[in-house]
């Protein structure tokens, strides 16, 4: 469980409205499994080193398993993975230690991992570091929330970038200002960051969906890294899905639909790679 949310967001310092700091940093070695909290990481043109290198591929459809279709794959969120050794910049991919609820840990290079995860998911498939040829596909659930959401009870099949397991771009960014805005709109919610799965959680002053103003701009993180902000992040049923200690909460999606067009956070590409660390300054360029 990531375990950081509004409590940390409330510690925002009173600083210039064009500056913030890197409050938390996460990577997700296995797509839709719980993530790792980091103190620092190398950021390559592909994204955070080691992020979303593994995924489960469904034998029946060939699609990438994603908790964005919770009825089929939501229980992946209760699994955890960690690298046996830190990934290297040369592109080598170390095996993972995978924790499946109710079972002993299994390494990703153990041949039994395919059947173990298939049994847990009740779907036949395999663990892979190789995205399907062409454009990989995944399913997304867009539930109706009192007529406020953009579609009604629809599962769509979406393409993701060829050669990767990313949804849109390699980096997802979220600010504390946005979490405060969501908390004001829905104060009873548990807005743990595990629901939203950012790579960079940025301590940013004020209350409002700050990063939506960054679309089409660049931000600098630390002394080296520059990100280009591509688009807002549309939210689906995944943010409402129970995982570990978090309960089902469709009210989160209802509040986002009402307050910010069902968006939270932004997708970014890496313009200049480098190393980032917690408390690094963040500024709009």
Image: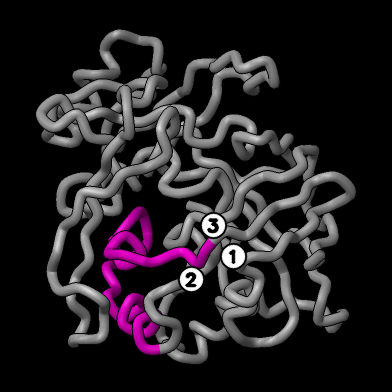
Q: CA distance from mark 2 to mark 1?
A: 7 Å
Residue at numbered disc 3: 267
Write the start and end of the magenta stretch as one range.
231-258
Measured from the top left, where is residue 175 in percent x and y?
A: 63, 70
Residue at numbered disc 1: 174
Q: Residue at x 55, y 25 (%)?
A: 83
Is residue 236 on the magenta stretch? yes
Disc 1 is placed on an element classified as strand
Q: Residue at x 59, y 65 (%)?
A: 174
Disc 3 is placed on an element classified as strand
> Which sits earlier in the primary sequence, circle 1 or circle 3?
1
Residue 48, compared with residue 265, is above or below; it is above
Measured from the top left, where is residue 105 in percent x and y?
A: 38, 24
Of circles 2 and 3, the one toward us is 3
Is residue 156 on the magenta stretch? no
Image quadrant where one finds the C terminus? bottom right
Measured from the top left, where is residue 95 in percent x and y?
A: 49, 16
Residue at numbered disc 2: 264
> Which sits earlier in the primary sequence, circle 2 or circle 1?
1
Q: Residue at x 26, y 79 (%)?
A: 149
Residue 56, compared with residue 17, is above or below; it is above
């Amino acid at each position: 469980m990531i375990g950081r949310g509004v409590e940390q967001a409330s510690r925002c310092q009173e600083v210039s409205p064009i500056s913030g700091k890197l409050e938390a940093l996460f990577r997700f070695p296995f797509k839709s499994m719980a993530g790792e909290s980091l103190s620092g990481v190398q950021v390559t043109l592909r994204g955070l080193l080691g992020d979303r290198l593994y995924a489960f591929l469904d034998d029946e459809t060939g699609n990438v398993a994603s908790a964005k279709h919770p009825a089929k794959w939501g229980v992946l969120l209760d699994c955890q993975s960690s690298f046996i050794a830190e990934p290297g910049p040369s592109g080598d991919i170390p095996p993972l230690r995978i924790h499946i609820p109710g079972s002993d840990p299994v390494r990703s290079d153990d041949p039994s991992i395919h059947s173990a995860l298939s049994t847990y998911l009740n779907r036949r498939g395999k663990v892979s570091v190789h995205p399907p040829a062409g454009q990989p596909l995944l399913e997304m659930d867009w539930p109706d929330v009192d007529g406020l959401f953009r579609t009604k009870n629809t599962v769509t099949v979406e393409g993701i970038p060829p050669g990767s397991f990313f949804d849109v771009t390699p980096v997802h960014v979220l600010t504390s200002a946005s979490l405060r805005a969501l908390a004001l709109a829905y104060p009873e919610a548990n807005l743990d960051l595990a629901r939203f799965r950012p790579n960079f959680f940025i301590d940013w002053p004020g209350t409002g969906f700050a990063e939506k103003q960054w679309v089409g701009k660049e931000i600098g993180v630390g002394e080296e890294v520059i990100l280009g902000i591509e688009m807002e992040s549309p939210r689906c049923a995944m943010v409402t899905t129970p995982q570990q200690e978090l309960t089902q909460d469709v009210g989160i999606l209802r509040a986002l639909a009402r307050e910010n067009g069902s968006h939270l956070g932004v997708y970014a590409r890496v313009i200049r790679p480098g190393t980032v660390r917690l408390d690094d300054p963040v500024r709009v360029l």
